[in-house]
Image (cartoon, rainbow, N blue to C red):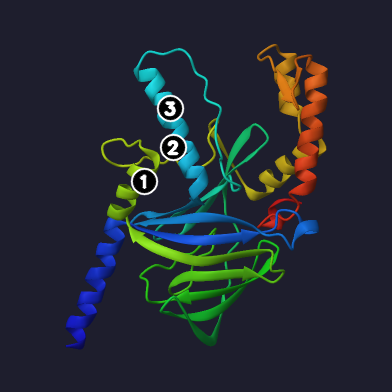
Amino acid sequence: MKKIYSLLMITVSLLSLAQGTRIMYEYKFASNLEKKDSLETELMYLDIKKEGSNFYSRQKFVSDSTRDAYFKKQIATGSTNFNYRGGNGGKIGYSISKSYPDFNIVLHTGIGNSRFSVKNENPMSWKILPDKKTIDKFEVQKATLDFGGRTWTAWFSQDFPFQDGPYKFSGLPGLILEMEDSTGTHSFKFAGSKKFDEVVKIEKEEIGSTRGGIVVKTFGVPGGKEIEVSEEQFKKQWKEYKNDPVKDTRQMLSQGNMKLTLNIDGKMMSEPSEVLRAMEKNQREEIKNNNNKIEPALYP
């Protein structure tokens, strides 16, 4: 009987991987340490398939899919009038891809006008503790980790056949259902799971755009080809951006490759130097206020 039960569990696990499973997390975080008592919230998806997983913001997914559907429709009808004003793209612009079984982990994100894919180079040395509790009917066990400039506490469950979790986190003998850093300014909480056949049905209704009956999602940050860089190269790019956040835009303007107009509080700006000053002020303000990255070691 035990052998039959074991075989049944293995079959169910393989079937789950073949079909694909979406794990949902409520992500609470403080972008600005000066406002850490007012946490922001974003619903995040962890899509798990046999070959790997992708972790990303639901709101960004909906926004990108709606935008892609708009342009596809305009092109299909022969229209040259593109007047897409965008929508709520969410608060989280990055995504994470993991490949199985080697667990290569890649961060897809942007700095200014550039898009990067950054392969994780830091191993995760988990410390598994004996503490246990229940989360949403699942038994979970405690583990701790120092990673990316933070100390994390995780709760993982072996009731799921996945050694994965939110953001880059993986490698425990089960699925991570909860994580929180020691400052309390970044946390993930399990918000449910669905098989992909349920997911496709829901997204058809939410987005109203599918290709071949399946909602198509391109992971990463839209707006250009990603540049593959090491973590050290990424840190260098970030430092350069902090020092001069409109460097790339200034270069493009000087080459005559683009013309910019800016609308700030109803005031239209088109003179290059005026536009650049306004853009730089805005970017520096954003850098100043977004000072509590989930992986601070990447953003010196």
Question: Label for residue 203?
Answer: 1
Q: Quadrant of residue 42?
A: bottom right
Q: Which of the two labelled residues, at mark 2 and mark 3, occupies the earlier sequence position?
A: 2
Quickly name the residue at label 3: 70
Q: Residues within 10 Å of mark 2 (few under 14, many from 20)?
A: many
User: Which is nearer the N-term, disc 1 or disc 2?
Assistant: 2
Q: Can residue 239 be seen by looking at this rendering?
A: no
Report whether 298 appears left or right of 284: left
Residue type (three-letter) at the residue carrying disc 2:
Ser
| Residue occupying the point 24% across, 69% down | 12
Give the image quarter of residue 36. Answer: bottom right
Marked residue nearer the N-terminal end (3 or 1) = 3
Using the image as rendered, state which of residue 38 and residue 170 is in the foreground.
38
- Identify the residue at horizontal 57%, vertical 67% (top origin): 124
Q: Is mark 2 in CB contact (under 8 Å) with mark 3? A: no
Q: Is label 2 in a helix, a strand or a loop?
A: helix
Establish if 187 lies above or below 141: above
> Where is residue 169 shown, x and y percent of the image?
53, 64
Judged left or right of residue 54, residue 8 is left
- Front residue of this view, candidates 300 and 283: 283
Q: Secondary structure at mark 3?
A: helix
Secondary-structure class at tag 1: helix
What amino acid does circle 3 point to? Answer: Tyr
Residue located beneath label 2 in the image? 65
Query: Whole-percent x and y of residue 84?
Result: 52, 25
Q: Residues within 10 Å of mark 1 (few under 14, many from 20)?
A: some
The residue furthest front is: 266
Mark 3 Cα within 10 Å, few/some/many (few <14, many 20+)?
A: some
- Amino acid type, callout 1: Glu
Q: Are marks 1 and 2 in contact (CB under 8 Å)?
A: yes
Q: Is residue 151 above or below residue 24?
A: below
